[in-house]
Image (cartoon, rainbow, N blue to C red):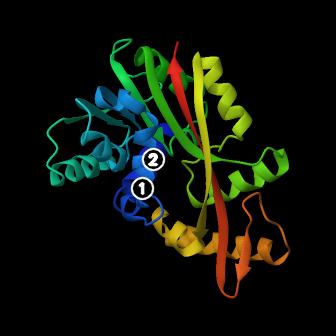
Amino acid sequence: MDHHAIVREEFARQAETFGRSATVARKGEAERVVEALGEARRGRVLDLACGPGLLAEALGRGAREVVAFDLTPEMLAQARARCERAGLANVRFGQGRAEALPFAGGEFDAAVTRLALHHFPDPGPPARELFRVLRPGGTAAVADLVSPEDPEEAALHNALEILRDPSHTRALPRSELLALHREAGFELLAEAGWETSREFGEWAQIANAPARTRALRVVMEALARRGAAAGIGLRLEGERLLFTHRWVMLTLRKL
């Protein structure tokens, strides 16, 4: 199956559960990304791979205009409903592929993308498109999960993510995330990193695929009992299966 079809299938299933996740929608997370844009957040802003609209809503409270763009119609419906509930009239919506955006070069003052790059088989084209549609001097904030620098640990981490959600391709290590955006032409303005503690049940529920995640729990518990951290600090505390996701956010400028 074409990977875009896999993404649409998975996120159609996850459209409601993703936006309701306490971790994905953690208070202050969307605002953290928006604030990284500085004054550029007050202009015309692209929310690339907008999902259920968490960033679009936060951006819409201060931007002149927000364009929320995503591949999956069900996610766009969630984003539209969220922004309507918030009374935002300055957010519009578009559907399509991030690798070929339907916008002219230099259309946007700022752009954001969160939790998206690990779903692309090749993240290079989306990064280059993000660069293309920004005006010279425009600002982007890119936030995503990162994998360990150690290749074996990273491979195990990504394998577990794919077993839960086949639209996941590869969380990049920090070094590759930086290199990707430098190669696209961006200047790095700032970098932030943080960790998010996850519990298996909450993480599995987002995927909305119980048969798949029941089998995955067996695998992850076996790894944890053998002391295999899988690059994510995998561990058992009583009956709780826990791990840690590491994030990196890059604030970038188009030269």
| Pointer 1 residue | 28
Q: Nearer the viewer, residue 214 or 251?
A: 251
Q: Residues within 10 Å of mark 2 (few under 14, many from 20)?
A: some
Q: Nearer the viewer, residue 132 or 60?
A: 60
Q: Confirm whether residue 96 shows in the render.
A: no
Labels 1 & 2 near each other (Cβ < 8 A): yes
Label 1, label 2: how far apart the Cα atoms are: 6 Å
Question: Which residue occupies 53% across, 26% down?
Answer: 252
Label of residue 32 in the image = 2
Q: Which amino acid type is marked by label 2? A: Arg
Number of numbered discs overlaid on the protein picture: 2
Question: Which residue occupies 63% across, 59% down?
Answer: 163
Rendering quarter of residue 101: top left
Rendering quarter of residue 198: bottom right
x, y (%) of residue 110?
39, 26
Question: Which residue occupies 67% across, 30% down?
Answer: 178
Rendering quarter of residue 50: top left
Look at the picture and state if 99 lies above or below 222: above
Q: Which amino acid type is marked by label 1? A: Gly
